[in-house]
Image: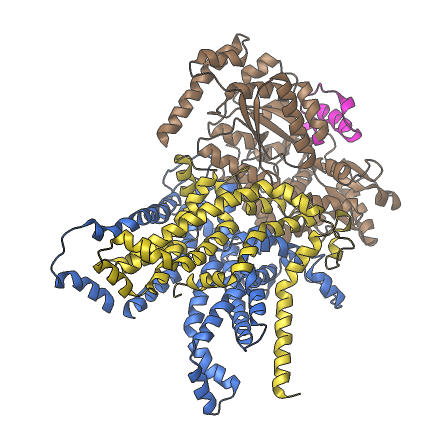
Chain colours: A blue, B brown, C yellow
Amino acid sequence: MDSLQRMDAVPQGRRRRPWTWERAYPILTLLPSIIAIAIFVYGFIFWTGYISLTKWNTLTVNLAWNGLRNYALLFQQFRFQADLRNLLVFTILFILCCLVIGLLLAVMVDQKLRTEALFRNIFIFPMALSFIVTGVVWQWLFAPNSGVNLILKALGVKHLPQWYVDPTIVPPGWHVGQIQLGLPIALIAVVVAAVWQMSGFAMALYLAGLRAIPEELKEAAAVDGANAWQTFWKVTFPQLHPITVTTTIILAHISMKIFDLIYAMTGPGPMFATDMPSLNMFNTTFQGNHYAQGAAIAIIMLLLIAVFIVPYLVSAFRQEGRS
Amino acid sequence: MKGKKALRLGGAAAVLVALTTACGTAGTANNASNTAGAGTEEKKIEIFSWWTGAGEADGLNALIKLFQQKDPGVQVQNSAVAGGAGTNAKQVLATRMQAGNPPDTFQVHAGAELMAWVDAGKMEPLNDLYQSQGWNDKFPQQLIDMVSKDGNIYAVPVDIHRGNVLWYNKKIFDQYHLQPPTTFDIFFKDADILKQHGITPLGLGDKDTWEATMLWEDVLLGTVGPQKYDQIWQGKVSWDDPGIRQSLETFKKMLQYVNSDHAALDWQDGSQLVATGKAAMNVMGDWAKGYYTTDLKLKPNVDFGWCVTPGTEGDFMVISDTFGLPKGAPHPNTVLDWLKVLGSTEGQDVFNPLKGSIPARIDADPSKYDVYSQQAMADFKKDQLTPSLAHGSAASPGFLDAVNTAMKVFVTNQDIDQFISALKTAAQENNLGQ
Amino acid sequence: MSARAVRRSLLYIILIVFACFYLMPVYVVIVTSLKSTAEIDLSRMWQLPHQLDFSSYADAFNHLAPNFWNSVYLAIPGTILSSLLGSINGYALSKWKFRGANVLFPIILFGMFIPYQSVLIPLVQFLDAIGLYNSIPGLILVHIIYGIPITTLIFRNFYAGIPDELLEAATIDGTGYWGIYRHIILPLSISGFVVVGIWQFTSIWNEFLFASTITQPPHQPVMVALQNLSGSQIVQWNVQMAGAFLAALPTLVVYIFLGRYFIRGLLAGSIKG
């Protein structure tokens, strides 16, 4: 806030400088990008929003007004209800696993190992891959008659899990609308693949966070007689709080948008157990030719993401303004 | 954008007016474009399809070669879209058609899938072509009806696949002295024997859902018969009809005899279960024969046998690939020449043996086809033809999409009431039969 | 053994177990892709090939080569152009404060968080209207535009680290806006360009949603082609694995040689930098 006020105050405090091209350059430089973003992001979102209120659920464009009917139908659909459940379950599991594994790996890698770089690179490399590659490969690893199940079989497991083929939802018994609430077993395989790919990201952020904590803090705790375990939870972990928040936000928005991985690995799955709004939107719009309905799904996805991204952006820039 | 599209459409319309008059006077399509005043048309054609698999791609290439022999100097762009058994291609096509950027000609299933484009006003009628080529009595009337609306014919069928075929592992059937299941009673009797011996009775791979929808439509046809089957998709039968419910009961019972990992398998995996002896039977369109003989090198009547699906003797579930002329196609005259080759006996006999399908014409040469196809060709001439729902012929893409969605749920929870109520909603939302 | 040695060994054991988990898919990909078709059997997935056989690579390459080159023609110009744009944007935002910059920037930044589904339908219509639908240039344009937020962000944070005194001295010397950019900012930007370049290259190469909706054969990038290759038994899965390996190779090579910068991009992408 301070810097904002300072900036506003500057031109008034000084004598107005004469107009030169020099002063216009920054804004002229930015202008094409601003226009592009205005059209391609905000204009297009607006247009999608409009389409979602029309009757364009046919092969040919039909922009007759349909009110909120597409949204109403959506929420009555088994598939969309399942999507929302899956999205929630997936997001929670995905973020939790990434954070826990990421933090664990970061702490282990941070023990001044000679092989630090090697391990770090192994844990991060999946980030360089496409979700499509990950999906193609993990699809085979979790195939019920192959991959992981061969190992389980060799270990003597009797009832082999069916992974992404299993339509079971645990725990049984909670029904809301048309769907059953709970954890779809089929989603676990997808979570494993997604965590495999993205946990390195959490590790990298935590590692950077750990390195930024001044040694003196830890030393001071050690002097006070705290052991390593206590030092970690009392000193180090609280210091990592902002990193946890940032990582959660980034992972959450990746999770809410997840598309490629599911598309390549499982598709909608048995009883839509691995379906997501993104996939539903793609099928509905481009394969089912229900454009208005697809647009409605897209708008709901956007709102779900905006709910936490907008406050995050606002707070990030308020902080930056202060510092 | 609008202006450009209007221009393009206007140009095409001018060509077409000239073209229809030219056809009437037995003039060739080529000099039609000269008199149109819209500039001479390049001898070029973009052929859009999803024929990228082994046999079908060969068939398409053979057709293109034949076309180029008949029409030297024609430039052919083969825009075949791979993946998803045609779903990718249909998506691409919809986007292009909406954008007013149609390919010259495209693959589309006869029936509702084609009619979606006709109803949208995107297709040109081909009555003159049929007239000039004398095709009106060369294709079965029921098939011509599937590509017609209000007396106008909109596409040329190039091949026929049969949807109601049950394939079985010959060795297993011989070993347990089983009878080919032409009725549901025999089917369940066989299935129980197989189950006792630890063999999966019915192999299924329904990863892409249409496989399950297809199994159900065959059960439905076998339960209610061809007349009522047709009427259902015309919206003339109540969804509470006992026949529909009974078909779902039977279908549900069948699902108790399928492999547990069916949701992870696609149709080929499902067919392969029969080939490897892990399952005894599989219901699949007769493209499975091509997969058995070409890809897996199995021998018909030795390694595998077939019969129609239970209760469908005398019925022929038709899946027919057709090509038409979209409005605004850049090279309409070349398209007409292409369609002439497609509809000729020569064209059909070049394409179909390679693809493993049978010709849509009833006067093709049976000696060019294998033992399965010869039998199917004979049936095709005398059987009642019914349109396949799962392959987009019976009802609009929107309705089919909704059925597939409901089917995905049904194969797991097997809740008949829920499925029927989903059918009702789908019929309402998609104006079934209108 | 001292307590420390026990702890260290334990640490290594856990790390190795995790490393095995992360490398497991790599093992499967490589082992499978080196088997001949005759040796392909899902129940023998983990076994080493009896004989090295590179035919699946040849097969996969036959399937994917044109799409692979499409991806090259897409990713290289896309990366260069969007890095340049990000650089001049970042310069404008970081060194030349103007009224409203701190409001404008988050508004631009929001563009990188949106689900692209929410712009997809208009985008397809728009690209068709300007004649770029189903073309690599169209896809390049899309990646440049939706890359603006992230490239601008990384460069803005990068340039914030350049001391203002340097610029002030140049201003007093009478060097203009573009002069300062050319002679002072640009030479200092090399590592910024590497970070942004790697980031953009990786994202463009790996992107699927835009690629699959905006392009059709023969213009599809390699990831779309790989997806079309997969999930069916018509194409054997040793070929799918070889295809996955080929498609992943460029970004993997970049990661292996420039991993440090890749990680910096990851951190910079999380806003704070």
Kindly tell me whether residue C177 is visible in this rendering: yes
Answer left or right for B173 relative to B214: right
As drawn, the residue found furthest toward the top would be B25
Along the viewing direction, whichever of A107 and A303 lies nearer the viewer: A107
Residues in magenta?
A: B355-384
Which quadrant is the N terminus of chain A positioned in? Answer: bottom left
As drawn, the residue found furthest toward the left would be A15
How many labels sit on residues?
A: 0
Kindly tell me whether residue B213 is visible in this rendering: no
Along the viewing direction, whichever of C229 and C99 lies nearer the viewer: C99
Q: Position of residue A42 (x, y in %)?
A: 34, 49
Along the viewing direction, whichever of C139 and A276 lies nearer the viewer: C139
Which quadrant is the C terminus of chain A positioned in? Answer: bottom left
Q: Is residue A58 above or below residue B411?
A: above
Answer left or right for C100 relative to B370: left
Q: Position of residue C163 (x, y in %)?
A: 31, 66
Magenta stretch containing residue B368, yes or no?
yes
Magenta stretch containing residue B385, yes or no?
no
Identify which residue is drawn at 34% across, 61% down.
Answer: C159
Q: Is residue B236 above or below residue A133?
A: above
Along the viewing direction, whichever of A98 and C15 lies nearer the viewer: C15
Quarter of the view holding residue B343? top right
Q: Position of residue A201 (x, y in %)?
A: 50, 65
Q: Position of residue C168 (x, y in %)?
A: 24, 62
